[in-house]
Image (spheres, helix red, strand yellow):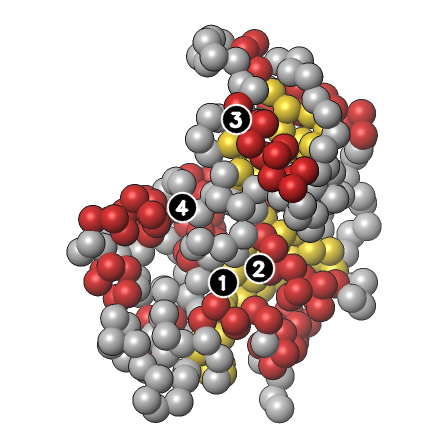
Amino acid sequence: MVACPLGVRAEEDDVRNLPQSGDDDPAAFTNLPNLRLPTIGGKQFWTDHCWRNGWRIQQNAMTGHWRLLDPGNIRFAWGTRAACEAELAACQPAAVQDHVEHVVLVHGLFRSAGSMQQLGEFLEEDQRRRIVCFEYASTRGSIGEHAAALRAVVEGLPSDVPLSFVGHSMGNIVIRHAVGDWEAASDEQVLTRVRAVVMLGPPNQGAAIARQLAKVEAYGWIAGKGGLELGPQWDALEPKLAVPQCPVGIIAGRLPDGFANPLVGEVGDFVVSVEETRLPGKAVLEVNQLHSLLMDDATVQRAVKGFLERQQFPKE
């Protein structure tokens, strides 16, 4: 992932150089001049809606305009989605038809796709699977909106390849919402291809820490609609979430006695309790690790890989 002053400047230019009128006109963002500058890839301002061979079409969560990034996060086009799709078709005419399993990694609240990069590299190193790191503006939208973007990315992948998902924290709730949407639409074309879901620190019962923090008004402004849905709005969200019918492996952090977070109230990873991670009938592997470091833990990475390969956690 490219991170440099030019990258930051390109992110700022995307907003500063937008037309000042005609925002409701589809042509307003067409044919905007583009310099192929590096960007920082998104990080709470952009959400992926299309992924093809590492190229991504993203929408800005604040302005609504679109851009096309190459695998190195260089901006190749921006403006309307149609303009970005046309440039993508010129640069990448079709998705790679390699028929290997595609594993979609979904980061958590306040994080970015970069937080899943090390795990993705570990899972991809034997070339038995392709990794899709889904970037979404987690603090700027509802979980349903994030799930809609995830569905768009998945539905744009090759239509006959096996699929698996690995989520961290709120990313798992986005996955469950997407699965619920596919089930509501009876979309067997997607559902029958999902081989496994691995959840890292998932707040599957809502999050006590979010309920506590939401008592402070600033929390909703900082964490956004999705952060509130994990806390005081959980009861309205939960009916929209599915328990995936494929094999599901849950990895929960359990810190030693004396390391409890009073905002969580129970033993866990300092953010999500072990009990909050559980789903009926689904395997739970407990590890001694903090919530924010689960995806980078070597034991966790091996467990994820083992579950993807055998639909059960390896015995060590």
Q: Nearer the viewer, residue 202 or 297?
A: 297
Of mark 2 and mark 4, the one earlier in the sequence is: 2
Q: Earlier in the sequence, mark 4 or mark 3?
A: 3
Label 2 secondary element: helix
**Residue 210 appearing in the image:** yes
Q: Residue at x 78, y 66 (%)?
A: 125
Mark 3 lies on residue: 15
Mark 4 burial class by Cα count in 10 Å: few <14, some 14-19, many 20+? many
Residue behind mark 4: 139
Q: Which mark is residue 168?
A: 1
Given the current orientation, which residue lies at the most extreme front position?
5
Question: Residue 312's x, y, as percent?
Answer: 58, 77
- In this orientation, which residue lies closer to the viewer: 297 or 174? 297
- In this image, 47 relative to 104: left or right? left
Foreground mark, 3 or 2? 3
N-terminal of the pair, mark 3 or mark 2, is 3
Question: Dots 2 and 1: beta carbons under 8 Å?
Answer: yes
- Across and down, in percent, residue 93 comes to 80, 30
Visible residue check, residue 248: no
3 and 2 marks in contact (CB < 8 Å): no
